[in-house]
Image (cartoon, rainbow, N blue to C red):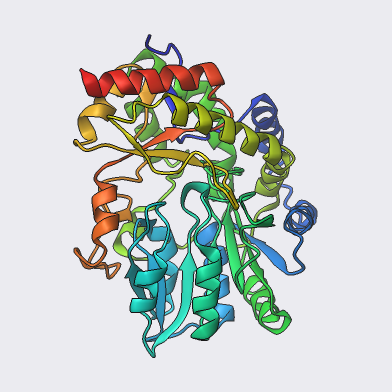
Amino acid sequence: MSFQKPVFVSLSPNTEKDDISLAFKVLFKFHKEENKKTEELERELKDYLNVKNLLSFNSGRSALMGILYSFNIQKDDEVLIQAFTCNAAINPIIERGARPIFVDIDNTLNIDPIDLERKITSNTKAVIIQHTFGWPAQIKKIVEICKRNQLVLIEDTAHSLGAEYEGKLCGTFGDASFFSFGRDKIISSVFGGAAMIKDESIFEKMKIFQKNISLPPKIWTLQQILHPILTNYIVLPSYKLNQYFGRIVIGFFHKISLLSKAVYKKEKMALIPSVFPKKMPSPLSLLALNQIKKIERFNEHRRKISEIYYKNIDKKLFIPVFPEKGLEKKPVFMRYPVLVNSGTDDILKKMRNHNIYLNDGWRKSPIVPLDTDLEKVHYVLGSCPRAEKIANRIINLPTHINVSENKAIKIVKLLNECIKN
């Protein structure tokens, strides 16, 4: 029952034929940089979110850098952020001279309000909540905690564009929020992001921040335009021939800088690469605009695929992280996480033998990717035991538009068989 065509959690999974065709068109025009498409993207996002103040950037981390600057987060300030997060959300805090303080997670992989309150000090200035894999955090409780302690609430909506809590979109509850259009996010322009700030006077500061940064180098923009093209026409077919050949091909493209990595080597050492913070280039805005038109279809598809996983997973062998129904929550399931009691390496190896690649990097460490230097990002092992335990037990299943309902049934059946054998 192995798949002929490889199935990935990442590697530009959202791209459809029209996205690839558009990437080709943009490729031949990308040197004609203009701001019109970026302004159009900002208008579309403001309309979708029903917010007034939003600016685009070349990544979610650039957007977060703009937010931290605008709220004057500075040396020795403490910013509370959950464990089981990406170093890209931590490094902007460190870059400001502030200190990330890690909070443990609840059973839905989101920040735990009880541990959050416990870790607030007189130096705490802000809280970042993540809405992990598109499942809304305990927003009401966290808003109350932040108001009571006069803390800035920042929503990391990189995983959750389109998710709702009591009919209101994630990313509209906090004082600020940032979004990512990375290669494996809800919508994708390979790199890209946006930031929202409610307060007009603080938003004016972010306008100054954005005005004073430049566009990324054109070679960097070219790398992102090439990603959906090379991934679909060369990388995935090479994995179809042989998984080791596939790794060699993508490694070669990285080595000759034809493709960029999702997380740079410097970021694993708590440093900010020179391509951040930058403005959003118009060619990538075009890719994002094409995807935002499809967001409702994408998210409804993710919900259907997640329901298939929930109904078909062997619950004696796997524990679904998210409940079947969200009650007041309407999640978007950027991934569908399940937990196992045994080690995950052997299961992922068996799934690779069936051409299913489930290692998305969100595993085996409370701060991802796995090879992030925990000391440099100020994480102390043992400080968030639930996050550490879950990181060692988690497997994330793909929910993107290129996983059909039939494929999802096959994936979950293979997963059940892999752990039994």
- Tally of marks: 0
| Viewport quadrant of the C terminus | top left
Q: Is 163 displayed left or right of 324 in the figure?
A: right
Say above or below: 95 vs 290.
below
**Between 28 and 410, which is closer to the camera in this rendering?**
410
Q: Position of residue 265 (x, y in %)?
A: 33, 54
Residue 416 location, quadrant: top left
Residue 415 position, x and y percent, is 33, 23
| Rendered location of residue 268, percent (x, y) | 31, 57
Residue 109 x %, y %:
39, 53
Q: Residue furthest bottom?
A: 122
Q: Of all residues shown, which one is farthest toward the top? A: 1
Image quarter where the N terminus lies is top left
Q: Is residue 277 visible?
A: no
Is residue 411 found left or right of 244 in the rendered image?
Answer: right
- The residue under the point 39% across, 77% down is 117
**Front residue (pair 231, 410):** 410
Relative to 408, is 327 above or below?
Answer: below
Query: Along the line of sight, which residue is nearer the eye, 134 or 34?
Result: 134
